[in-house]
């Protein structure tokens, strides 16, 4: 499974790059707003340090506007993925951009029916928001399972499932068990994945026993 980091903060991305665990980045208008930076500069700077897919979201809600903005965003760098909302206009824009070989990420997906339409529209990625479904009392992980079954039924549906709105490490494990192609994870949760108290205790005990030997490895 690929790991994308869900942030528009360049420093957060830089801090994670040395782990070599980051396969891409996703942003959205709220993350750009939170960064306080210009979207084109931000996406350009991210694409300079991340070679994998970098999602940048349009803000128009009209088809022609989405296509125009999508082409502006895609002109920033060849690894830009144009993010489009899962609306009729977004699906039309997705189809037209995909026909021009511009990669797309159809976002704000909350149902299997929506995901089926995104695949039919030629989306490169679909982003089911599992955390926001959980927040509303609906099982978000179940949506990943449904989409995986549907997509695997048809050879011609090659849209990748990009599990988004990840709230905890359990979400990451659950979506990977269900066959999501990608999880886009906030930086803090990515770092939480490595943590386990028994690892800390075990390492402390190893080092304590080792110290008693008086040895050094050099
Ligand atoms: O960026 C897309 C998605 O990951 C947003 O998640 O936490 O705003 O529901 P969240």
Image (spheres, rainbow, N blue to C red):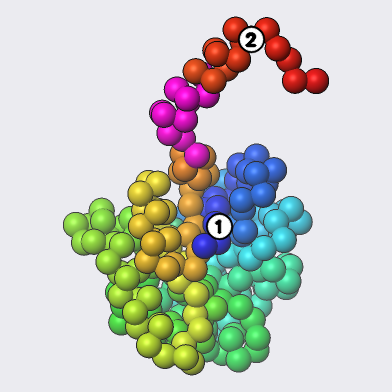
Q: Give the residue at x 40% y 82%.
A: 151
Residue 15 falls left or right of residue 1: right
Q: Within the image, what quadrant is residue 110 found in?
A: bottom left
The residue at label 2 has a CB less than 8 Å from ligand 1: no
The crowding category of the residue bearing disc 2, from other C-alpha atoms within 10 Å (few below 14, some 14 to 19, many at least 20), is few
Q: Number of marks in the image?
A: 2
Residue 179 on image: x %, y %: 42, 68
Residue 131 in magenta stretch: no
Write the start and end of the magenta stretch as one range.
194-204
Q: Nearer the viewer, mark 1 or mark 2?
A: 2
Q: Give the residue at x 37% y 66%.
A: 178
Vertical arrangement, residue 23 with respect to residue 213, above or below: below
**Dot 1 corresponds to which residue?**
4
The crowding category of the residue bearing disc 1, from other C-alpha atoms within 10 Å (few below 14, some 14 to 19, many at least 20), is many
**Dot 2 corresponds to which residue?**
213
Chief SS of the magenta region: helix
Q: Give the residue at x 26% y 56%.
A: 134
Separation (CA) of disc 1 from disc 2 = 43 Å
Viewer-proximal residue among 93 and 171: 171
SS for callout 1: strand
Q: Quadrant of ligand 1?
A: bottom left
């Amino acid at each position: 499974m690929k790991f994308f980091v869900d942030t528009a903060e360049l420093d957060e991305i830089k801090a994670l790059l040395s782990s070599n665990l980051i396969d891409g980045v996703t942003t959205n208008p709220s993350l750009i707003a939170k960064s306080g930076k210009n979207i084109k500069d931000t996406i350009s700077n991210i694409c300079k340090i991340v070679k994998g897919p970098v999602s940048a979201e349009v803000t128009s809600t009209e088809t022609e506007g989405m296509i125009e903005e999508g082409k502006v965003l895609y002109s920033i760098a060849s690894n830009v993925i144009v993010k489009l909302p899962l609306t009729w206009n977004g699906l039309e824009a997705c189809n037209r951009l995909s026909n021009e070989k511009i990669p797309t990420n159809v976002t704000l997906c909350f149902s299997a029916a929506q995901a089926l339409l995104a695949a039919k529209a030629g989306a490169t990625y679909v982003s089911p928001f599992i955390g926001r479904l959980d927040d509303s009392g609906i099982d978000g992980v179940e949506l990943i399972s449904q989409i995986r079954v549907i997509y695997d039924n048809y050879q011609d549906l090659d849209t990748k499932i990009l599990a988004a709105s990840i709230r905890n490490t359990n979400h990451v494990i659950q979506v990977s068990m269900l066959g999501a192609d990608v999880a886009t994870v906030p930086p803090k949760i990515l770092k939480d994945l490595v943590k386990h108290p028994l690892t800390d205790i075990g390492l402390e005990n190893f080092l304590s026993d080792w110290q008693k030997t008086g040895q050094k490895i050099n």
